[in-house]
Image: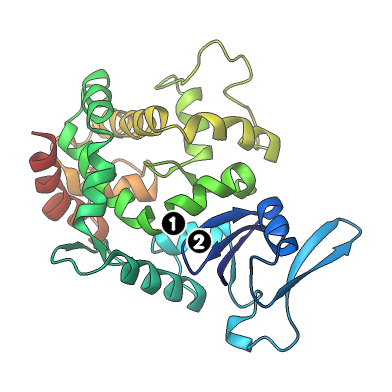
C-alpha cells in the first residue's frame, strides 16, 4: 500500500498519512506500519526530536512525501476557497471522487470541489435534530442555519476522516473547526459576549487577550463537537442579526448572513451586500435545507 497524502502541523511535522485506499494513520500508527513493511517506498529515520518517515531515494519526485504534504491549516483554507488547492490536494480529491463511483447529483460550493449530493445529505441528516434545536434555542430561521451547514459539510466532506485523525494538532493558528467550521477565536468571542457557552462550569473559558496554543487546544475540545459547533453557528447568526438590527433586519436575509458567516460580524449599515458564497447559500443551499429538514 502506498502513502498518497500527508498532513503536517504548522511546523511541517507530519501528523497524518493517507493511503491510496483512503485509510488514515496517525504518525505513531504510520511508524508501526512502516516497521511492519505495510507501506511501499518509505523508510524510518530517527532524529533528536523523534522518528520520521521519509521516501526512498529512488522515489519519483511527484510521489515524494514532501510533495504529497500540506499543513492542516492550509488544507482548511483550500477547502474554504481562501487559497488555491495544491497539486497534492487536487490529486487526493480526484482519487476520493473516483472511489465513490458514478453519481448523477453534485454540490459544488463556490471555489471548492464538486461533491456528491448523497454524501453531503448523509452527514447533514445525521445532525438534523441538533440543527432544529439550535435554531429554536437562538430564535433563528432553521433553514438559514441548515444552508450554512450544507456549505460547510460539502467543503469538508473529502477531508473529514483526516481531520478527525489530526485532531487538535492543527490549532496552532486561528483554524476553522468542526462540522460548522467555526474559528477558535470566534467561538471564544461569542463566549465572552455571553451569546453561547458550551460549558458554563468551565471557569477557564472564555480566555482573555491573545489566545495561546494551549488556550486553542482547550477550546478545541468543545468546538469540534457537533452539538457545540452547530450551536456556535446558531449563536453567530443570532448575534449578527442583533448587531445589525439598528440599521436593517437580517433575519430573513440568508445571502447576507451567509456572507457575514465567512467574513465576520461586519460594520452595520443600511444596505449590506452579499458575496458569491452568500448568494449560493441563499439560492441553492437554503432550498436544499428546507427539503432536508422538512
Q: Which residue is mark 1?
A: 159
Q: Which residue is mark 2?
A: 75
Q: Residue at x 18, y 32 (%)?
A: 142
Q: Position of residue 205 (x, y in %)?
A: 58, 21
Q: How many marks?
A: 2
In this picture, residue 292 sits left or right of residue 127: left
Nearer to me, 95 or 202: 95
- Quick one: label 2, few (<14), some, or many (20+) residues within 10 Å? many
When asked about the image quadrant of residue 122, the answer is: top left
**Are discs 2 and 1 less than 8 Å apart at CB?**
yes
Q: Position of residue 10 (x, y in %)?
A: 67, 57
What separation in Å lies between label 2 and label 1 (alpha carbons)? 9 Å
Q: Position of residue 219 (x, y in %)?
A: 57, 31
In this rendering, is residue 16 above or below 288?
below
Q: Residue at x 24, y 64 (%)?
A: 108
Nearer to me, 98 or 144: 98
Residue 271 visible in the picture: no
Amino acid at each position: 500500500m502506498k502513502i498518497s497524502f500527508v498532513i503536517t502541523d504548522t511546523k511541517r511535522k507530519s501528523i497524518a498519512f493517507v493511503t491510496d485506499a483512503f485509510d488514515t494513520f496517525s504518525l505513531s500508527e504510520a511508524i508501526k506500519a512502516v516497521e511492519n513493511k505495510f507501506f511501499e517506498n518509505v523508510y524510518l529515520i530517527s532524529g533528536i526530536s523523534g522518528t520520521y518517515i521519509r521516501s526512498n531515494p529512488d522515489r519519483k519526485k511527484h510521489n515524494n512525501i514532501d510533495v504529497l504534504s500540506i499543513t492542516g491549516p492550509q488544507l482548511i483554507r483550500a477547502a474554504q476557497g481562501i487559497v488555491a488547492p495544491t497539486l497534492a490536494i487536487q490529486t487526493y480529491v480526484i482519487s476520493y471522487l473516483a472511489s465513490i463511483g458514478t453519481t448523477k447529483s453534485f454540490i459544488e460550493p463556490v471555489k471548492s470541489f464538486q461533491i456528491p449530493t448523497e454524501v453531503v445529505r448523509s452527514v447533514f441528516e445525521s445532525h438534523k435534530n441538533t440543527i432544529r434545536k439550535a435554531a429554536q434555542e437562538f430564535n433563528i430561521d432553521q433553514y438559514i442555519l441548515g444552508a450554512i451547514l450544507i456549505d460547510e459539510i460539502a467543503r469538508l466532506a473529502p477531508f473529514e476522516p483526516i481531520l478527525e485523525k489530526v485532531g487538535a494538532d492543527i490549532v496552532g493558528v486561528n483554524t476553522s473547526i468542526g462540522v460548522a467550521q467555526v474559528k477558535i477565536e470566534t467561538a471564544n468571542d461569542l463566549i465572552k459576549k455571553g451569546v453561547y457557552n458550551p460549558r458554563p462550569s468551565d471557569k477557564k473559558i472564555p480566555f482573555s487577550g491573545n489566545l495561546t496554543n494551549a488556550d486553542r487546544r482547550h477550546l478545541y475540545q468543545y468546538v469540534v463537537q457537533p452539538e457545540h459547533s452547530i450551536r456556535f453557528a446558531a449563536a453567530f447568526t443570532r448575534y449578527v442579526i442583533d448587531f445589525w438590527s439598528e440599521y436593517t433586519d437580517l433575519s430573513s436575509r440568508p445571502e447576507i448572513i451567509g456572507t457575514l458567516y465567512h467574513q465576520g460580524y461586519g460594520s452595520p449599515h443600511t444596505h449590506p451586500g452579499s458575496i458569491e458564497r452568500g448568494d449560493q447559500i441563499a439560492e441553492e443551499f437554503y432550498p436544499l435545507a428546507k427539503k432536508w429538514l422538512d
